[in-house]
Image (cartoon, rainbow, N blue to C red):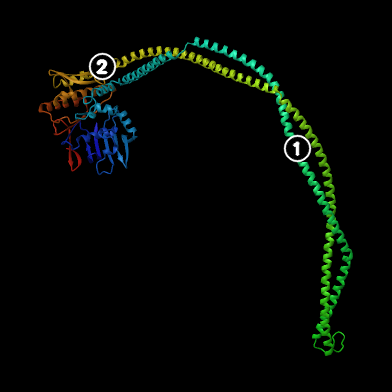
Amino acid sequence: MLSVITLKDFISYEYTKVNIHGAKSVVVVGDNGVGKSTLLEALIFADYGIGRFQYLNEYARSNSGGSFEVEVIRTDVPSTGNILRVCRGMKDGKGFAKVWLDDVLKAKGKEVSTYVAEITGLDADSTMLTSFFGLGDNDRSDPLLKVLPSKCLETLQKIANVFIYTKFYKRVSDDLKSVKRSMELLENSITVMQKVVEDVPTLKKSLEKAKKGEELLITRLSALRTKRNELTAEEEKYQAIVRERDTLQERRKQLRSIGERTAKELGRLKNDIEYSKGDLDESIEDRESLQSEIAQDSVEQLSDIIGTLTSAVSSKQTMKKLKSVASDIQTSTCPLCESPITEKTIKGWQQDIIKLDTELKKLISDKTTKGKELKDLLESDKRLVALKRDIKNLIASIENDKAKFGDTKSQRTLNDAALNKADARYTTLCKRLNSSGYSKVSVDMQAVNDRTETYQRQSGAVKQEITTLQDSIAENIKRNRELKSNKQELFGSKKTAKALSILVDAWSRYGIPLNLLKDLTAAIEDRATAIYQEFDSGMILVQDVEGNKPGVRFILKDRKGSRSFGGLSLGEKVMFYIAVRVAVSQIIAAARDIKVDCLVLDEGMGNLSPKNRDNLVRMINKVLRKIFPQVILTSHTELPEIFDRTIQVEVDGDVSKARVL
């Protein structure tokens, strides 16, 4: 049973906590639009996260910052007898959900709805069928009476657990359509293949004819090859002569070139010998001149003269220095010989110094002249050595050039002989090649080549024809097999289509599903009619509806005729609606062996006449309170004579508030 509802920033509620613990009947009163239905909508939202909005943040009250929370507490849960607490909401932009059983956390997040369904025995759809009767004008509040006939049929199929058969029907129907499409494709393929398949025996005859033609061409080609081999032998002889002639022609060019180079080489060697002889004569004259020069004034004589001059220069310099020093001494006695030094003596020394200076200059000049002569003489000696070496080299070079001249002259003689021999052979070969025999072989060979090429082209065409015919035979054998296979497959598809057609008929709404629904619809009709007849005459029936989709609808058959739910008066609608929904609720509870402990009636008393209101009061007291342990009704007026507890809902500004009276 429902015990406590707590709302924080949920839709129009800022904060509300409603405690109806122990109340077996509760009425929620207030004007239109104050939030009565919102208070009850929080129950289904907390358990399963479903409601009027698609997105979670739409449930948050304006100016709440996007966060909200709903908490619902139930006591004496039928399957356990425990206390069940469910909390769901949004915080910091993320949704959350939790469920406790006797203050023990059992599940979080997406697992909450599954756990609630396990504890209560009802999922979201079953809860909307058994515990929430919405008499408003929205089809979400009711999946039976306020929906299209096709939707109503789907709901009954789910209740009867036969909706799986509709899936079988769809699957079998799709398979049948697929098989029929395959059959159509196979039939088209068979038709096309029958048109393109050729007669294999005729193709084989054409193949034999082509093979005979190929054999004839092979015989002709063989004869041509024999003739060509004979001509090739003759041609090879002439080709050998041509190759020899061409080789000789090249050899003649080479020999002429060698002869020209040899002649040039002989001329060069002759010139080199003449030049070398001239250089040798000049070198000999230079050698004789230098030898004569060196003989007149030898190196040793010049060296002795230079030595003598050097000693004289040294002696004179020493004497000059001594007399210069003595002339500057300020004493009257010679420090060496202790003889008296007079002014006359000093003047005599000074004159000697002048004389010595003149003699030194002459001696130094003579020494320099003799040094230069010695240097020139040494250079001449070196030149004489070099000239002797050059003369020796020139003599060797002349002898070497004379030897080369003799060898080259012999080589030229041999080359001229080889050239004369090659010219004679070349002339002979040219005469042989100019004969008519070679021309005839060439003409015959060209004719044989032309005929061979023609027969080869014809042979290639015949081979291609043979290959094409063989491929065509193989392809047509394959096509015949495919044609036979397609016919067999078509035969099998027809059998399959026939079997699927039987299944389609069986699983259609007029087959097995219809029979399975008969018991359910009969039970609903019986129970709903019994409840309705407590207050008015008439029968509630389930009627098939034809249209784009198969469906059913509930009708009331009474003295006024047969009318659907939309054609009833407001009072009739209320009684009809409650009768059908209570019947369905009882059937579901009995089928699942569960107890529905709470019933919510939304907008049950609105705009009812006094008579119809009395009927609803009687319905609540006589039927609903006996079936459901707790009944909750929304109304515009208080009904203290019926309900144990009254919840007053009001609006303060744009915020809804609920309190228990």
Q: Is residue 606 left or right of residue 369?
A: left
Figure quadrant of the C terminus? top left
- Measure the C-alpha gap from mark 1 to mark 2: 128 Å
Q: Position of residue 85 (x, y in %)?
A: 29, 35
Foreground mark, 1 or 2?
1
Which of 555/307 is in front? 307
> In terms of secondary structure, where does tag 2 sit?
helix
Q: Position of residue 367 (x, y in %)?
A: 83, 72
Q: Position of residue 587 (x, y in %)?
A: 25, 21
Q: Is residue 266 left or right of residue 644?
A: right
Which of 32/259 is in front? 259
Which of 594/459 is in front? 459
Q: Return the residue at label 2.
A: 519
The residue sitting at 73% across, 31% down in the picture is 247
Q: Amino acid at mark 2?
A: Asp
Whether residue 432 can be seen here = yes
Q: Amino acid at mark 1?
A: Arg
Q: Residues within 10 Å of mark 1 (few under 14, many from 20)?
A: some
Closer to the chain start, of discs 1 and 2, is: 1
Q: Return the residue at label 1.
A: 256
In the image, residue 622 sits, relative to residue 210, either above or below, namely below
Q: Residue furthest left?
A: 610
Which of 637/366 is in front? 366
- Kindly indicate the quadrant of the structure image that contains residue 653: top left
Q: Residues within 10 Å of mark 2 (few under 14, many from 20)?
A: few
- Kindly indicate the quadrant of the structure image that contains residue 589: top left
Figure quadrant of the N terminus? top left
Q: Position of residue 19 (x, y in %)?
A: 22, 37
In the image, residue 268 sits, relative to residue 312, either above or below, namely above
